[in-house]
Image (spheres, rainbow, N blue to C red):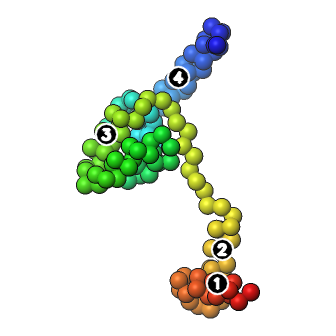
Amino acid sequence: MTTVIELLKDKNRINSIKKVDEKIPDKEKKINIFTYLLQIYEKTTKIPYDKRVAPAFLITMWLSHEPDLINLTQNMNLRHWLDDKDVYNYYFHTVPKGYRYIKWTKKDEKYLKEKQEIEEIMLEYNVSNREATMIKQHKERIK
């Protein structure tokens, strides 16, 4: 159960964040895909949708990382012919309000090491990426 003091602290923290946000001129604020995702989460329409900044494909890709939203993204994948603005409006009106921390999956060290090995083979034998991958697989089979 939250106390009145905790609520006041949260309110003060939120107000201080808003004040800092207001101090930043509009010209310096970067509009990117995360701006539009935040609008979807908070149900605010501060900035009109621009499909050049956040195409529907990217919005769908980011939202598909949240397990609760997989069904919504699947519905949009089945209707791939829709305009980007329509897809954005669908997400805006159907995604439940609330902030979500969607973690982007990064490439692991194993993948980066394999990629480096393939690049070394490409330089050593002067072959394409596909041929270097085949050579690497062949070397692994011989071992």
Which amino acid type is shown beneath numbered disc 1? Lys
Q: Do the residues bearing badges 2 and 1 touch, measured as CB atoms within 8 Å? A: yes
Which amino acid type is shown beneath numbered disc 2? Glu
Which amino acid type is shown beneath numbered disc 3? Tyr
Where disc 3 sits, the SS reads helix
Distance between mark 3 and mark 2 Cα atoms: 40 Å
Tell me the residue that label 4 is attached to. Answer: 19
Which label is found at residue 90? Answer: 3
Q: Please state the horizontal and vertical placement of residue 49, each as a whole percent of the image.
A: 32, 41
Number of numbered discs present? Answer: 4
Query: In the rendered view of the protein, which quadrant contains the N terminus?
Result: top right
Residue drawn at x 60%, y 56% as measured from the top left: 106
Q: Do the residues bearing badges 3 and 2 touch, measured as CB atoms within 8 Å? A: no
Task: Tell me, yes or no, if residue 8 can be seen here.
Answer: yes
Distance between mark 1 and mark 3 Cα atoms: 46 Å
- Of mark 1 and mark 3, the one earlier in the sequence is 3
Which label is found at residue 114? Answer: 2
Tell me the residue that label 1 is attached to. Answer: 136
Residue drawn at x 27%, y 44% as measured from the top left: 86
